[in-house]
C-alpha cells in the first residue's frame, strides 16, 4: 500500500496456500466451493470486502439487507469461503462477562443473543447448542483469586452482569466441582451464557443467502496483493484493489482480515499481531460422557512455565453408542509453540510438541475417567488469530486513509463480538447511526481514533510480553 506509513515489524503475509485441514472445513457447501459469482473480476464496485469469515459475511449481510441494498458489493477471499480463522477456531460462542470493560461485556451478550435468535429464526443448520454455561477452571490459587476479585468488583458496580456469574470456591462441597467435572482445580467461575456451534455452517448460511442478491459478488481464491490510491483521472479519491486476477476500483474497502490485516495495512503491524493457535478434535474415551459446559483451563506461570495455560474445550454432539461423535474440540498449549505463536501467520503446519500436549493433557484437568495415557485425535489443525495491542478489537475508518475501514483484532475472542462489530462498521461506512433502537452501542474501546492508536503504542508490544497483555485480566488470556 504505497500511501501507508508506520512500523513494519511482524507484518503478516498472504494466507497459506495449503493450510492444515480443519475439522470444521471437512464438509464444505457445494455452492461455495471455488465460487466466483462472475467468471471475471469486476472492474469496479461500490464496496469491496476483503475476507469471508464471520466479520466479512455479517458486514455484507447488514449492508445489503438493511442499509444499502443497491450498492454493488464484491467480497474477495484468498482461499475457500470462510477458510480463515472463523473456519478454524474452537467452536465456542461465549461472551466474556468479567475481567473486561462492562460496555464490552454488554456488547458481547447482545451479540450472543443476536446469533442465537438468528439461528432459531432462520433455522440455521449449524449445530448451535445453548450450553448450561462456560466453566473457567483455575489451576492456581493466585489466578483464581484474581478472577474472584474481578467478580466481586463487578457485583458492586454492575450487579446485572455479575448475576451472569457463579463462583465455585475450593472450599465448596466437593460435589460442586465434581458436577462441573473439574474436581481437582483450585476454584471455578461459571458463566451462564455459552454455546457451541459449527462456525463454518453458520457463515455458509449467511453467504449462501447473500448469493441470491443481485448486487453481491463473491470471488474465492482471489488474494488481495495490495491497496493503492487510484491513479485514473476518471476515479479521483478512489482505491485500487490489486489481485492476481486484475484490479478493482472502489471508493470503500473493508478489511475483515483479522490476523492478516497488516498484510494490506502495514501501519497496523504493531497494533494487530498475527498469532497462531492449534486445536485438535480429540476422540473421547468410551463410554462417551456428554458435557453440558464449555471449558477454559487457566493457570499462572508455575513450575518454570513462561506463559499461562490457556486451554479451551467444547464438545461436539454425542450421536450415540454406534454412531460415535462427542469429539472434544480442544485447543491451547501455545506456551509450547515456537515463539508462543507470536507473529506467525502461516497455518500450513501443526507443531508436534503442541499436538502431543493436546492429546495428553485433556484428562486431567477434565475428569473423563482416563487419567493416564494419550487420547487419539481425528483432526489436528492451526489457525491465525489477530491479537490487539490493547486487547480490544479495532473497528472503524483508518485515520488518514479515507475509504479504508477495519473490523479486526479480536484477540482470539471474535465469535461473541464480530457479528455486531460488523453491523457497526457497516453503518459507519454509510454515515448512518451506529445503532438502532434496542441495540447495544459499539464500545468506545473498539473505535479507531488517532488518540487510541497513540495510546496503544505507548504500551508494551505484544511480542515483548508474550501476547498476554490486557487479555481477560492480568495473567488470563482470551480464547474463543
Image (cartoon, rainbow, N blue to C red):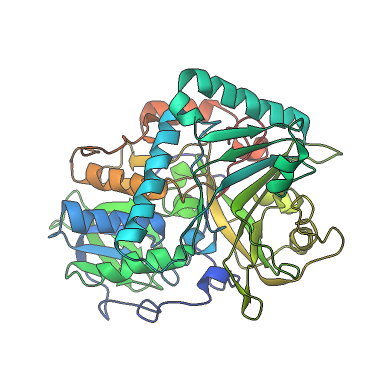
215 or 285: which is nearer to us?
Answer: 285
Residue 379 figure quarter: bottom right
Query: In the rendered view, would you say 443 is above or below 384?
Result: above
- Farthest residue in the top direction? 156
Q: Is residue 366 left or right of residue 2?
A: right
Could you say which is closer to the camera, residue 64 or residue 189? Answer: 189
| Residue at the image position 61 percent from the left and 70 percent from the top | 20
Q: Is residue 411 above or below residue 212?
A: above
Res. 73 image quadrant: bottom left
**Residue 32 appears at what percent x and percent y?**
37, 76
User: Can the viewer see residue 353 in this picture?
Assistant: yes
Q: Position of residue 329 (x, y in %)?
A: 63, 61
Residue 207: image location, x then y, percent: 32, 67
Relative to 431, does residue 449 appear above or below in the rendering? above
Task: Answer whether residue 228 is visible to the viewer in this image.
Answer: no
Q: Residue at x 52, y 42 (%)?
A: 192
Residue displayed at 68% across by 63% down: 289
Say which residue appears at 40% left-offset and 79% top-offset: 33
**Image side of residue 336 versus residue 121, left or right:** right
Q: Nearer the viewer, residue 184 or 375?
A: 184
Number of dots carrying numbers = 0
Relative side of 327 to 5, left or right: right
Amino acid at each position: 500500500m504505497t500511501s501507508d506509513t508506520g512500523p513494519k515489524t511482524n507484518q503478516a503475509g498472504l494466507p497459506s496456500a495449503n493450510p492444515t485441514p480443519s475439522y470444521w472445513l471437512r464438509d464444505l457447501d457445494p455452492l461455495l466451493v471455488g465460487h466466483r459469482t462472475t467468471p471475471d473480476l469486476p472492474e469496479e464496485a461500490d464496496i469491496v470486502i476483503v475476507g469471508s469469515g464471520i466479520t466479512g459475511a455479517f458486514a455484507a449481510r447488514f449492508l445489503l439487507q438493511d442499509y444499502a441494498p443497491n450498492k454493488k458489493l464484491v467480497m474477495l477471499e484468498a482461499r475457500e469461503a470462510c477458510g480463515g480463522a472463523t473456519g478454524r477456531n474452537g467452536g465456542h460462542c461465549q461472551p466474556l462477562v468479567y475481567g473486561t470493560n462492562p460496555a464490552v461485556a454488554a456488547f458481547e451478550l447482545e451479540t450472543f443473543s443476536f446469533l442465537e435468535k438468528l439461528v432459531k429464526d432462520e433455522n440455521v443448520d449449524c449445530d448451535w447448542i445453548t450450553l448450561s454455561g462456560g466453566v473457567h477452571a483455575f489451576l492456581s490459587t493466585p489466578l483464581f483469586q484474581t478472577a474472584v476479585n474481578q467478580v466481586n468488583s463487578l457485583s458492586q458496580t454492575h450487579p446485572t452482569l455479575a448475576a451472569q456469574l457463579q463462583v465455585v470456591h475450593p472450599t465448596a462441597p466437593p460435589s460442586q466441582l465434581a458436577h462441573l467435572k473439574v474436581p481437582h482445580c483450585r476454584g471455578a467461575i461459571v458463566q451462564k451464557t455459552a454455546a457451541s456451534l459449527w462456525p463454518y455452517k453458520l457463515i455458509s448460511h449467511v453467504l449462501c443467502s447473500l448469493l441470491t442478491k443481485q448486487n453481491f459478488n463473491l470471488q474465492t481464491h482471489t488474494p488481495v496483493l495490495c491497496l493503492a490510491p487510484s491513479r485514473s483521472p476518471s476515479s479521483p479519491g478512489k482505491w485500487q484493489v490489486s489481485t492476481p486476477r486484475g484490479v478493482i476500483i472502489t471508493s470503500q474497502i473493508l478489511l475483515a482480515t483479522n490476523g492478516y490485516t497488516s498484510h494490506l495495512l502495514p501501519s497496523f503491524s504493531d497494533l494487530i499481531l498475527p498469532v497462531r493457535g492449534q486445536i485438535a478434535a480429540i476422540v473421547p474415551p468410551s463410554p462417551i460422557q456428554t458435557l453440558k459446559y464449555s471449558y477454559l483451563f487457566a493457570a499462572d506461570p508455575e513450575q518454570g512455565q513462561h506463559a499461562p495455560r490457556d486451554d479451551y474445550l467444547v464438545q461436539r454432539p454425542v450421536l450415540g453408542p454406534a454412531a460415535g461423535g462427542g469429539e472434544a474440540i480442544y485447543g491451547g498449549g501455545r506456551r509450547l509453540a515456537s515463539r508462543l505463536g507470536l507473529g506467525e501467520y502461516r497455518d500450513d503446519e501443526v507443531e508436534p510438541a503442541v499436538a502431543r500436549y493436546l492429546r495428553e493433557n485433556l484428562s486431567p484437568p477434565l475428569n473423563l475417567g482416563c487419567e493416564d495415557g494419550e487420547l487419539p485425535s481425528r483432526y489436528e489443525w492451526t489457525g491465525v488469530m489477530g491479537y490487539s495491542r490493547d486487547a480490544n478489537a479495532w473497528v472503524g475508518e483508518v485515520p488518514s486513509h479515507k475509504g479504508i475501514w477495519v473490523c479486526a483484532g479480536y484477540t482470539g475472542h471474535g465469535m461473541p463480538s464480530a457479528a455486531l462489530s460488523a453491523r457497526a462498521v457497516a453503518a459507519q461506512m454509510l454515515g448512518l447511526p451506529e445503532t438502532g433502537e434496542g441495540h447495544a452501542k459499539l464500545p468506545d474501546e473498539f473505535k479507531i481514533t488517532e488518540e487510541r492508536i497513540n495510546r496503544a503504542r505507548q504500551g508494551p508490544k505484544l511480542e515483548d510480553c508474550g501476547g498476554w497483555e490486557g487479555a481477560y485480566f492480568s495473567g488470563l488470556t482470551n480464547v474463543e
